[in-house]
Amino acid sequence: MERLQQAIQKAREARDTRQPQSLPLTDEQRHVPEEGADKDIWLSVPEIKIEPRLISRNRLMSYRGGPDASPYDMLRTKMLQQIRSNGWRRVAITSPYSGCGKSTTAANLAFSLGRQEDLRTLVVDFDMRRRGLAEILGQTGSYSMADVIQGKVPFHKHALRYGENVLFGLNYTPTRNPSEILQSKRMIEVLERLEAEYKPDIMLFDTPPLMASDDSHGFLKNVDCALLLAAADETSIDHIDVAEQQLAELTKVMGIVLNKCRYISGAFGHEYGSY
């Protein structure tokens, strides 16, 4: 009897230490993402590296935060209030013509949004005729967002990450026929796939100037709203009026931002000069 009890005890111990065998997964279980999978897909994107000398030279005022970032932080907060009130996600930044600072504004808004740790922001440069954001951020590469749309390179291998909650999709080479690409069915499918895979709270698009080509006109119907950038002492009232009318026919106008203001002393509690 004693030997029998010892054998039973050994069998129990062996059973307790044995690893349970996993049952085969059902089809539904195979498609259930693991906890933290959303974060992993963001962190798998390479981190952007910006040379310190470019921060001042290219007016990346929001990169380090602080008082110099206040104008962009204020713009960010007003933008977020409208986004949340209206249930928007896709926001375009455009201008009547080039030189109004829309790409610089897009970069600074990205850094400002990056300090909102509870938000995920995807920033895409769809001004495909030039390097734009890549030039401002001092980045080099071999592809463009046109290549992502056409399936030549996956987004996760092309994108760059700032912090843990901002992704950039840049253009390292100009695109020959951006208007056709921006109006294609594949572009719509790529945006939907990016939303499904990365689940961003905000998608910020740097789009071509309205009066320079039809590139924006074919794309802006796919966004929820747009900010119109104008340059102080450069953009005429007539151009702003025409651009706003064109924009209103394509999407909702979130507002008009007067950029490059030189005389705003005291407007934000500090002396900023031009920004």
Image (cartoon, helix red, strand yellow):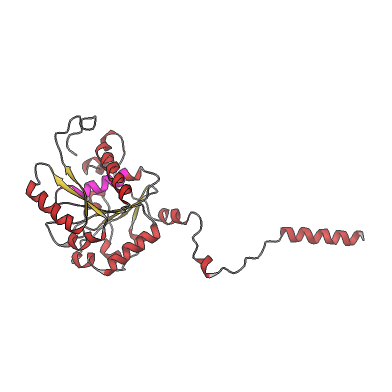
Quick one: 202 or 99, which is closer to the camera?
Answer: 202
| In magenta segment, residue 126 | no
Query: Is residue 178 in sight in this rendering?
Result: yes
Residue at image coords 17%, 61%? 217
Q: Which quadrant would the C terminus be assigned to in this image?
A: top left
Quick one: 27 or 47, which is closer to the camera?
Answer: 27
Residue at image coords 36%, 63%? 193
Query: Is residue 143 in sight in this rendering?
Result: no
Q: Residue 186 placed where, x, y %?
A: 29, 68
Horizontally, residue 144 falls left or right of residue 248, namely: right
The correct choice, above or below, for 77 with respect to 153 in the image is: above
Horizontally, residue 191 falls left or right of residue 118, namely: left
Q: Residue 143 placed where, x, y %?
A: 28, 62
Quick one: 127 or 184, which is closer to the camera?
Answer: 184
Horizontally, residue 233 falls left or right of residue 76, namely: left
Q: Look at the image and give the residue range highlighted in magenta.
A: 93-112
Residue at image coords 34%, 61%? 155
Residue at image coords 48%, 54%? 36
Q: Which quadrant would the N terminus be assigned to in this image?
A: bottom right
Residue at the right extreme of this rendering:
1
